Amino acid sequence: MQTRFIHNVFFWLKNPGQSDEAKALENGIRTLQEVHTVQDFHLGKPAPTNRPVIDNTYSYHLMLVFSNLEDQTTYQDDPIHLKFVDDCAHLWEKVQVYDSDAGLLNN
């Protein structure tokens, strides 16, 4: 049974005004869609919305969809993901992750 595991990652750039650093992070993030366990990929910037419940202080949002937790765990150790972290970690000040597993609703 396919359950869908959603991996949301929010990045805050160290130097948000540096377009070359932003582009380097964007390019690095885009390589992650090549990991074979990634089912769906979304990369975005904060939307121009303004309500008290919205946090739009981040620079980039990455959403990856996996079939299950095991595929997401495989992604964490994939050489493409590890290279991304090695190549790009110096560009971000903060990373926040929110994972959700639809399979837990079926228990």
Image (cartoon, helix red, strand yellow):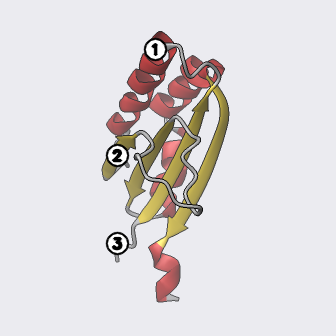
Position of residue 29 measured from the top left corner of the image (x, y, whole percent):
43, 31
Q: Which residue is mark 3?
A: 2
Position of residue 1 measured from the top left corner of the image (x, y, whole percent):
34, 77
Q: Which residue is mark 2?
A: 42
Local SS, label 1: helix
Kindly identify the residue that appears in the image at 60 percent across and 20 percent down. 91
Label 2 Cα neighbours within 10 Å, binned few <14 / some 14-19 / many ≥20: few
Residue 62 as seen in the image, left or right of residue 97: left
Of residues 92 and 41, the one drawn nearer to the viewer in this rendering:
92
Q: Residue furthest bottom?
A: 107
Using the image, tell me which numbered label, if any, was put on residue 19: 1
Mark 1 and mark 2 in contact? Answer it, CB < 8 Å: no
Local SS, label 3: loop
Q: CA distance from mark 3 to mark 1?
A: 39 Å
Position of residue 76 measured from the top left corner of the image (x, y, whole percent):
55, 43
Kindly identify the residue that appears in the image at 51 percent across and 62 percent down. 69
Kindly identify the residue that appears in the image at 45 percent across and 43 percent down. 46
Please state the total of marks drawn on the protein image. Answer: 3
Label 3 Cα neighbours within 10 Å, binned few <14 / some 14-19 / many ≥20: few
Tag 2: amino acid: His
Q: Of circles 3 and 2, which is in front?
A: 2
Tag 3: amino acid: Gln
Position of residue 85 measured from the top left corner of the image (x, y, whole percent):
58, 27
Mark closer to the chain start, 3 or 2? 3
Mark closer to the chain start, 1 or 2? 1
